[in-house]
Image (cartoon, rainbow, N blue to C red):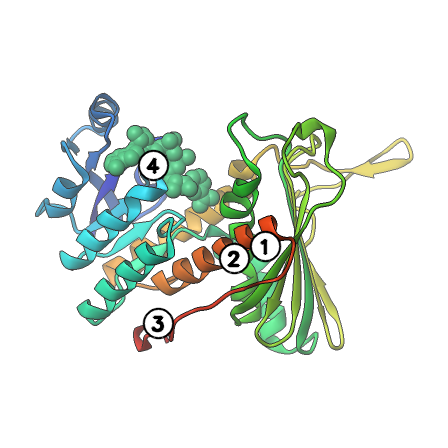
Amino acid sequence: MTVRIGVIGVGMIGQDHIRRLSKVLAGGRVVAVADTDAARAREVAGGLGSARAHATGQEVIADPDVDAVLVCSWGPSHEDYVVAAIRAGKPVFCEKPLATTEAACLNIIEAEVAAGRRLVQVGFMRRYDDSYRAMKRTIDSGEIGAPLMMSSGHRNPSVPGHYTSDMAIVDTAVHDIDIARWLFDDEIAETLVIKPRQNSRGGELHDPLMMILRMRGGALVNVETSVNIDYGYDIRGEIVGETGTVTMAESNTVIVKSRGSFGGRVPEDWRERFMRAYDVELQEWLDACAAGEVRGPSSWDGYAATVATDAGLVALKSGGWATVTLRDKPTIYG
Ligand SMILES: NC(=O)c1ccc[n+]([C@@H]2O[C@H](COP(=O)([O-])OP(=O)(O)OC[C@H]3O[C@@H](n4cnc5c(N)ncnc54)[C@H](O)[C@@H]3O)[C@@H](O)[C@H]2O)c1
């Protein structure tokens, strides 16, 4: 079965997902697109041959030829599209964030609960990365005992001029927050944000930041965001368990030894580092759609991440611990 897909928002990630759906993955075909930039939507649709450019995202969702929806527009617009897709009974893949406010996330959860089944997958692609999956298998096997602590490093060579200290939490650390919840299979209870000496390359930006997450079970996770580190895009991870540790290996496929030293490549950016994870993520979404199922990060995961980043913003301002308070988890989320 070919899943016929409508894409809302055809900017950078939308076009990248269209490329992988059209050229890399099996089982999906993009049949409709929309963007507030109508010329861009027409251009992208034109490049696909038979795809339609609709005037609005709502028209994409209502299109009877669309089986499933991909939301890749700006964060504040996600809520309306995801809720509409749920009400139309269509599976929807929503790029992170699920929504930009807690209230908007709860609206989505309420719509899904009213539908009586999961329809939403959120774009937390790290869960599809080979290294993180191997770390998860190691923890779940019991090989290192109960996990007690994690160090998570999120390093970018540089960021655009409009990047703010809040974005270090909302746009950058959010991936580490989701992966910590997933690896520990636990919710975050509270968070603290510490500001080390500033990197002079970042101007006024609080960079780096150290965000501490205390999980409900007591484990501690420290998330380092360093977004002006120059040398490359470097994702680090180590978990200390009761009887062992699991550490993310370097991501290159070869190590070169020459003239008394050894080395390898550091990825240039997140596209290079997570290219395969994005492919696996969307392939598994397509496979689930074809099977009439929805798997992967849920609206609950999107909601929990947004509540945690909101608490992170409070902690950044106050300098103290901020509590992460979640409502009761509806049964459809397991
Ligand atoms: N998972 C990841 O690692 C990852 C990486 C990059 C971006 N993202 C997320 O993907 C989303 C898009 O990011 P991007 O970098 O592609 O941004 P972008 O600015 O390149 O593209 C967004 C597109 O959405 C369109 N748009 C905005 N509001 C719209 C609306 N209401 N209806 C229809 N179209 C609308 C814009 O015109 C633009 O073409 C964001 O939520 C971002 O956080 C996730």
Number of the front mark, 2 or 3: 2
Report if the beta carbon of the residue with label 1 is closer than 8 angstroms to ligand 1. Answer: no
Image coords of residue 74 (percent x, y): 34, 38
Q: Is residue 107 left or right of residue 182?
A: left
Cα separation, mark 4 vs mark 3, equals 27 Å
Q: Residue furthest front?
A: 318
Instruction: Locate ligand 1 by image quadrant.
Output: top left
The answer to whether residue 102 is above or below residue 159 is below
Hey, what amino acid is under mark 1? Answer: Ala
Which residue carries the number 1 mark?
Answer: 315
Image point (27%, 59%), residue name = 108
In the rendered image, residue 239, in percent from the top left (x then y), is placed at 69, 64
Name the secondary structure under disc 3.
helix
Q: Residue at x 62, y 62 (%)?
A: 321
Percent coordinates x, y for residue 125 in the rendering: 46, 51
Residue at the spot of label 4 = 14
Tell me the CA gap for discs 3 and 1.
28 Å
Residue ID for mark 3:
333
Crowding at dot 3, Cα within 10 Å, few <14 / some 14-19 / many 20+, comes out as some
Is disc 4's CB within 8 Å of ligand 1? yes
Mark 1: secondary structure: helix
Residue type indicated by callout 2: Ala
Mark 2 / mark 4, whichever is N-terminal: 4
